[in-house]
Amino acid sequence: MNFEQLFRDYWWLIFPVGGMLMGVFGMMSHHHHRSETLRILKSYADQGKEPPQFLLDQLKNDEDRAMDQAYGYQGGGRYRHRNGGWGSVVVFAALAAGFSYMGYQTGSDASHVFTALGMAFGVAAAALFVLKLIGVLFGPRSRPDDGKRRDRVDD
Amino acid sequence: MTELFRQFWWLIFPAMAMVYGLVQMILRSSYEKKKLDLMRSYLDRGQPVPDALRRDNHF
């Protein structure tokens, strides 16, 4: 029982742990961006000047993103939203198929891991598919003037 | 040591979730404080607070 064996058994943990670290880092840099925006707005306010519209828009856009996340549209909100978001379903389904195939083919100890990954991605793909289907059937229709509506500040 | 890791490696996930929640809570409170500070500086000058600040923004 040494560290090489341990690494061999748990190398795949690099991916989830790396993902978590990226999530925390992204949250921190997002917060930094927003606080800097507030700081600039404050210096405008201290000088008694009207802040430029795009700074206020930046706050608004962050809120849009937060709303998108709260309502289940994953990251990068607007683009995915407009795109329909079927790409993530395809990616998850492809990963599920690939890992299931690996789990089926490899006879070694690792096959359990691959099978488990395949099942997890398969469930995720099915869930995303159902969510997207519900979104398409019952969600808000995209309108031709979407871009204009989103740029509005006061609503 | 390695045996301990083998038995409790899954604890990484709940522990990281807790860390994530804690970091989120700290950052949110810091952001809200700054926002309130900015709003106060608007009010001190007697200027109207912009609508973009007034909105509830959770992340």
Image (cartoon, coloured by chain):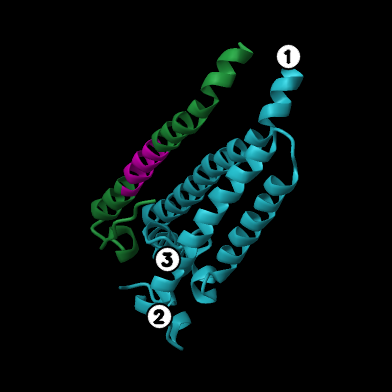
Chain colours: A cyan, B green
Among numbered discs 3 and 2, the one appearing first in the sequence: 3
| Residue B8 visible, this orientation | yes
Residue stretch rendered in magenta on the structure: B24-35
Name the image quarter holding the N terminus of chain A. Answer: top right
Residue tagged by mark 2? A149
Seen at 42% across and 63% down, the residue is A68
Among numbered discs 2 and 1, the one appearing first in the sequence: 1
Q: Residues within 10 Å of mark 3 (few under 14, many from 20)?
A: some
Residue B25 is one of the magenta-drawn residues: yes
Task: Identify the element where label 1 is drawn.
Answer: loop
Does residue A96 lie above or below A132 as drawn?
above
Residue closest to the eye, B45 or A56:
A56
Name the image quarter holding the C terminus of chain A. Answer: bottom left
State the mark number for residue A131. 3
Task: Identify the element where label 3 is drawn.
Answer: helix
Q: Where in the figure is residue A62, as x and y percent of width and height?
A: 44, 59
Q: Where in the figure is residue A84, as x and y percent of width and height?
A: 51, 74
Q: Are marks 2 and 1 in contact (CB under 8 Å)?
A: no
